[in-house]
Image (cartoon, coloured by chain):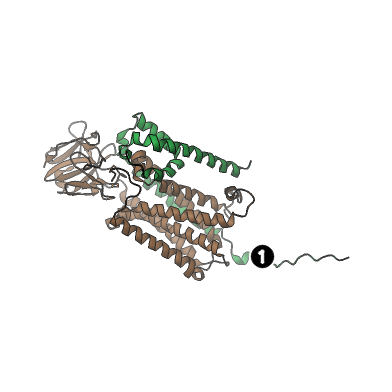
Chain colours: A brown, B green
Amino acid sequence: MSVKYIPVQWNPNKWVYDAIMVVAVALFLWIFIFIAPDVLNHNRAINPQIRNARAFGACAFFMLTIILMIGPLARLDTRFLPLLYNRRHFGVMAFFIALTHAFFVLDWYFSFTPINTYEALLSSNTSVTRLRGFPFEWLGLFALLVMGVMALTSHDFWLKFLTPRVWKALHFLVYPAYAALVGHVALGVLQDAQSPVMIASFGAAAGVVVLLHVAVALKERGGGGDAAAEAGEPGWEQVCQADDVREGFGHIGILASGERVAVFRQDGKLSAISNACAHQNGPLGEGRIIDCLVTCPWHGFQYDVTTGRSPAPFTEKVPTYDLKLVDGAVFVRSEANPPGTYVEPVPA
Amino acid sequence: MTLAALLVQLAGIWVWIGVAVAVVFLTIGVGRIDEDARGAYVFRPLVAPGVILIWPIVLWRWWLLETGRDAWPLRHRPQRRFHGRAWMVMAVAVPLIFIAAMLARQSQSDLTAPVLLSPPQEVSE
Ligand code: FES
């Protein structure tokens, strides 16, 4: 959470996360470069420059693959949530690995041209109308650019400044980028690779990513909360029964506008806040009340359930909803209160 | 000028404008629109590359915040549906790209066997 911005937020958990990640990356590169050349069986003998480029490229591809798997895994099974917690460092690292790959490539294939290196990269192959021999470098360049935008806008400052909505819209670019990356690999190195291990592992990785996301999309179709019903007074909607809300936990209701409300019970009283965390719009209603504060399941931002405010010195706020009980049914006002507005909890 | 040269030149211009925007935004702007940035300086160089990359978006957001046009409810309204739809497209696109690329592969045996060329004979008179 932010108080004053600092360059990188680390804590013991993140140190462990990052350490495991760095070791895994080093291991991958070491195996690829020194142990496996024969196993991977590059069709024609390749020189160290090309091998390095391929090692870093493969590493970046598999890192992005894992990054894209974390989201759906965490949706399917909460035991994967810890992976989500520090995914940003994972993404930044993947970008730098991909950048290293790009420099190895430029330094070898494009460094002996009489024209500008980047110009050579863009002009050496322009046969976009053919599949065989397609300029796969462009696909890689696009993916690299997107990974760069994401890595360089990963600081919490960006979330607050751009708003989670715009920030996430930018991050959606990672989907076309991944498709481009699959094309980059398949139309590039795999055209040449004779080893079935290479082809199978790239194909399987991309396949798993797609399957996981489709599984989540099917699971969540319309789900993730109960649709509210407009009843009684206009401007109020019924979101659930008071009994649905367990002490210390939340219950998510979907309003007619599509907005989600998280109803919490604390000390036997009910309060309603927006379900979207101020950080990255994580689902607050799936979080728990810890030390009297609603705790976001994604990265642990906390809010007072009566005001929607993070405890001082933090400054995050989420909107609150007026709430009332009618015969054991929980009603909230359809219009949210401005973030940070106090609402008296209702005994139930 | 070739298209490639033009693109490289445009990228250069983009970066220089970005640098200018970054300098102004990170010295004057950021403290005006974000209370958490006041008195915090070390993080600023770290976000500078991001400003350089997406400076038009930075200018647009800065303007919204400065003029009080930022609509707060939007902040709390994620576009949830987009993921599902995007992956339905991806579920078709990614396998299609991969399979098409694999079908385009040439088998080594189809290729004409390489011939070692000998240097042209010197013509002796
Ligand atoms: S989304 Fe990051 S803490 Fe809630």
Front residue of A274/A256: it is A274
The residue depicted at 35 percent of the width and 32 percent of the height is B65
Name the residue: 53% across, 57% down: A104
Residue B49 in the figure: left or right of residue A275: right
| Percent coordinates x, y for residue A340 in the rendering | 22, 36
Looking at the image, the residue that sits furthest to the top is B67
Q: Is mark 1 within 8 Å of ligand 1?
A: no
Residue B56, horizontal then vertical, whole percent? 45, 36
Residue B100 visible at all: no
> Extreme right residue here?
B125
The x and y percentages for residue B90 are 43, 50
Question: Label 1: chain?
Answer: B
Q: Residues within 10 Å of mark 1 (few under 14, many from 20)?
A: few
| Residue type marked 1 | Thr
For disc 1, the marked residue is B112
Relative to B124, say whether B9 is above or below.
above
Task: Count up the numbered dots.
Answer: 1
Tell me the quarter of the image containing the C terminus of chain A: top left
Give whichever of A117, A331 is nearer the camera. Answer: A117
Above/below status of A20 relative to A1: below
Position above or below: B113 against A85 = below
